[in-house]
Image (cartoon, grey):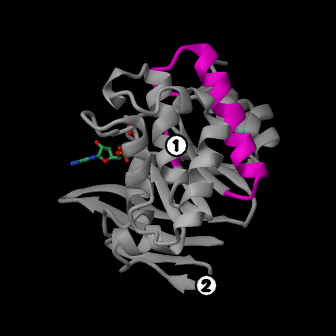
Amino acid sequence: MLNVTDLVVNYGAIQAVKKVSFEIHTGEIVTLIGANGAGKSTILQTISGIMRPKSGQMTYLGQPIQKTSAPKIVQAGISQVPEGRHIFPGLSVQENLQMGAFLRKDRSAIKQAYADVYQYFPVLKQRRHQDAATLSGGEQQMLAMGRALMAAPKLMLLDEPSMGLAPIFINEIFEIIKAINAAGTTVLLIEQNAKKALSIADRGYVLASGHIKLSGTGQDLLANQAVQQAYLGG
Ligand code: ATP
């Protein structure tokens, strides 16, 4: 579904991503794990069309996308759930969700999307008229995921969904990621919580200082000694 080859991304003179290659097959959950500053977010931003690669290729469903604009990427079926949620305060929960569907025209499909989102996240339905800023951190993460789902993505990019959440919310969010995937959405998950991410991932890549150091199935990486020492607390 997505093939990334020799991707290089710079911030001025800083090379954040150094010839990274990976692939995501339709239906998979793939995770990129790695420490702070490894380049994970930069890769997501580049897939989303927010940042431009210095060099390398990205193909999505067989089409090159390295020059495609961010709105066109969304229209093509790739939605990002950004780190830190970035919900719109001052707008209700429902209005935030509506923003996720802003490129869609089919009203009955949009109606169905609300129903799907409210099924995944019943709390959002309860709070649909509430200002989004009044939601807890976990609920804001749900809203950010719901907003991405409103675009009916084929591929969902999740940037640190567990960040700053209480353990009970983390478990719930990961269960919902599995459910969204089981319903047909392919997932690319960026996480510092490597244990959780690998435990739900079909495959994973370990990123360090802008390079891919290791790759394998989620289970293989969980069992890998070097991964355990570096990322799973020994
Ligand atoms: P984090 O979990 O902290 O977001 P990450 O693995 O997602 O880490 P990136 O945010 O992609 O890593 O950062 C990769 C490298 O690029 C780091 O060295 C970081 O300092 C640098 N970097 C990130 N954003 C900028 C920026 N806006 N300007 C300059 N350098 C940046």
Left or right of residue 119: residue 68: left
- Determine the CA span between mark 1 and mark 2: 26 Å
Query: Does residue 55 lie above or below 209 as drawn?
Result: below
Q: Quadrant of residue 152?
A: bottom right
Q: Quadrant of residue 62?
A: bottom right
The residue that disc 2 covers is: 62
Q: Residues within 10 Å of mark 1 (few under 14, many from 20)?
A: many
Left or right of residue 208: residue 189: right
Query: Does residue 20 lie above or below 181 as drawn?
Result: below
Q: Which region of the structure is painted magenta?
A: 158-185
Q: Secondary structure at mark 2?
A: loop
Q: Does 24 lie within the magenta span?
A: no
Label placed on residue 145:
1
Q: Position of residue 227 (x, y in %)?
A: 67, 33
Identify which residue is drawn at 40% across, 75% down.
Answer: 72
Q: Position of residue 197 (x, y in %)?
A: 66, 36
Number of callouts: 2
Identify which residue is drawn at 43% across, 19% down.
Answer: 136
Q: Position of residue 66 (x, y in %)?
A: 41, 77
Identify which residue is drawn at 37% across, 75% down.
Answer: 55
Residue farthest to the bottom? Answer: 63
Q: Nearer the viewer, residue 106 or 173?
A: 106
